[in-house]
Amino acid sequence: MISPTCPGAIEPILTILDGKWSLLLLRELFNGTKRFGELRRALHPISPKTLTDRLRMLEENGIVTRTLYPGVPLHVEYELTERGTHLQPIFAAMWDWVQAYGSCPRQETDAQGQAAEAAM
Amino acid sequence: MISPTCPGAIEPILTILDGKWSLLLLRELFNGTKRFGELRRALHPISPKTLTDRLRMLEENGIVTRTLYPGVPLHVEYELTERGTHLQPIFAAMWDWVQAYGSCPRQETDAQGQAAEAAM
DNA sequence: CCGTATCCGTCTGGATACTG
DNA sequence: CAGTATCCAGACGGATACGG
């Protein structure tokens, strides 16, 4: 947990994006309903404990729903809520930024930096 | 550090947004050039060590610049680079989301959820 | 298959005191 | 003023084994 002060500014986002995996987990869920095992493979090498922790947190914050289909073997699906799907513009903005400015600054020669300048 | 794999997807964002304070720190810097002490007060109760750590990380990633004005007492200013200012749409998207869906889900009655539905 | 239980290492961030 | 140095606590996440 990062900040318990919920109302006001971008603090709620801090809760949702907190932790090493939340961003990557949400990215997976934007591609549709996923099962626990699918998420686990997609986020490899995440541990089951951590995956459960993150999923529970997102549930508590109303970002994902957990649906259990009884039977053996067990079948559980995770899906974004409406509130969750509306996070999409944030990810779109992140993606746009990465396209334009995201390459590692420490690795690039300054010649590459100029390309972006020239494009303006 | 979260992910050393830099090229590709949103992973570079993970580096920049990593940690408890990065988001809040960037928010301050969107309001213009800030001095170390200003940031420290704005992010109170952040410790000087942590503030320095975050600032250094943002420098290394080409998000902020550090400018030293010699003299006594010391005067140092931190400012977003161009790369840094272009993160703004991400924050705008976060802000939009918080306005529409950000109130604590655990605290709200479901009557409040309906208001958002009606607005669509 | 989908987790939980347990244990444990690491790493982040805080407290405090001190320096240029 | 703007940090650095040092030490430390606690959170976070991993590994593994087991249960429904």
Image (tube, coloured by chain):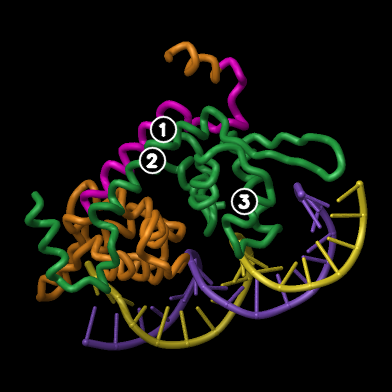
Chain colours: A green, B orange, C purple, D yellow
Q: Residue at x 83, y 35 (%)?
A: A70
The CA distance from mark 2 to mark 1 is: 8 Å
Q: Which amino acid does label 3 sit on?
A: Leu
Horizontally, is B21 left or right of A2 in the view?
left
Q: Which amino acid does label 2 sit on?
A: Ile
Q: Is mark 2 on a helix, strand or loop?
A: helix
Residue D17 locus on image (x, y percent)? 86, 70
Residue B11 locus on image (x, y percent)? 41, 59
Q: What element carries label 3?
A: helix
Point out the frontmost of discs 2 and 1. Answer: 2
Q: Give the quadrant of residue A76.
A: top right
Q: Give the quadrant of residue A29.
A: top right
> Is B86 one of the magenta-colored residues?
yes
> In the displayed structure, would residue B47 be above or below residue B100?
below
- Which stretch did the figure color magenta? B84-111
> Is B89 one of the magenta-colored residues?
yes
Q: How crowded is mark 3: few (under 14 residues within 10 Å), some or many (20 or more)?
A: some
Q: Give the quadrant of residue B5.
A: bottom left
Q: Determine the chain carrying the residue at label 1.
A: B
Q: Which of A22 and B54 is in front in this view?
A: A22
Contact flag, marks 2 and 1 (Cβ < 8 Å): yes
Residue B7 locus on image (x, y percent)? 35, 63
Residue linked to disc 3: A39
Q: Which of B76 and A91 is in front in this view?
A: A91
Residue linked to disc 1: B97
Point out the frontmost of discs 3 and 1. Answer: 3
